[in-house]
Amino acid sequence: MAITADHFKALVRRHMEGDDQGFYSVARQVAARAAREGKNIFAAELKELIESAGTQPAAQLRTVPIQQPRGELAGLMSVNYPDVTLSMMTLTRDVRTKLERVLTEQRTAHRLAEHGLDPIYRLLLMGPPGTGKSMSAAALAHELKLPLFTIQLDVLISKYMGETAAKLRLVFDTVAETRAVYLFDEFDALGAERTAGNDVGEARRVLNSFLQFLEHAAPTSLVVAATNHPQLLDKALNRRFDQVIAYELPDRSAAIDVLKSRLAQLDTRGVKWSEVAEQTGELSHAELVRAAEAAAKHVVLANRKRITTTALMNALRERRRLDNG
């Protein structure tokens, strides 16, 4: 069947909202699915109809400001338009390359659809806390000029235990209806080993529901799952995502780049970076930023503009002390 129930509902909703570009974007998905299923005549005819309407490629669709979710969705997700860019982030070459590939495929989705192909649209980001996973989702949303919907899975599961699968369906209905980036944060709360925990049956039902929804998610949206604890994830999960990206704590060179970037508005010419680098071990990107901000506040409140090596190293030591409890 070339058109799914989700596609049909999305088409009707787009039509009711007068969103012609969104309507034809969903129609492209139907054509691509038909081509994959071997319904070449139907796919070609639908593609011809779309092209004759003079529509824009999906990557050029204009996004419309979106209000905060209401009704049943209000307690499930929040939405915003991020202003962070990939150029603002300190990333390893591997991570940056993979994120740029996602952007390239999303921006040229219309070309892929012509050959019955979908862009990368299901991402799994994993690594230690504070290494840039959530920020990467925000950057992808900004670069694609899309809203970012954030779903806190740990809250969803604890608050709606017993009806989590039904709530997930509401979320994925929105994925099909509204082109956006959807971040499922704390994904290990959902994707933990199916044999773990006390309520194995309920956890398995919820996870299986998520995987089913993910399998049929609309490729015009970008679904991003992020976890701080990849070791807890069910081993079968990786193959359900189009791309898995591993984040690591920054090495000394990357750590210095993070500090310099955050302190760019202050005078750092006197800082002995080789000495500072010795204090950056085992600190995440987020912790390095907080240390830099602490040192900057110390200087600003003292009516100075120059960051000293001592102030920065003290801030890093304090951050490490707090991190170690």
Image: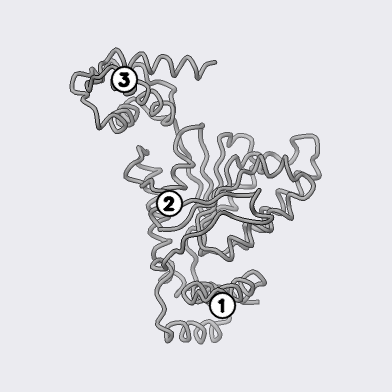
User: Which residue: 22% across, 21% down?
Assistant: 306
Q: Which residue is mark 1?
A: 15
User: Which residue: 43% across, 69% down?
Assistant: 58
- The image shows residue 77 at horizontal and vertical percentages of 60, 49
Disc nearest the viewer among 3 and 2: 3
User: Which residue: 54% across, 48% down?
Assistant: 183
Scheme by which the image is coloured: one colour
- The image shows residue 295 at horizontal and vertical percentages of 33, 20
- Residue nearest the observer in this picture, 235 or 12: 12
User: Which residue: 49% across, 17% down?
Assistant: 322
Q: Which mark is residue 140?
A: 2
Residue at disc 2, secondary structure: helix
Q: Earlier in the sequence, mark 3 or mark 1?
A: 1
Q: Which residue is mark 3?
A: 301
Tell me the quadrant of the picture where the C terminus can be found: top right
Amino acid at pointer 3: Leu
Q: Earlier in the sequence, mark 2 or mark 1?
A: 1
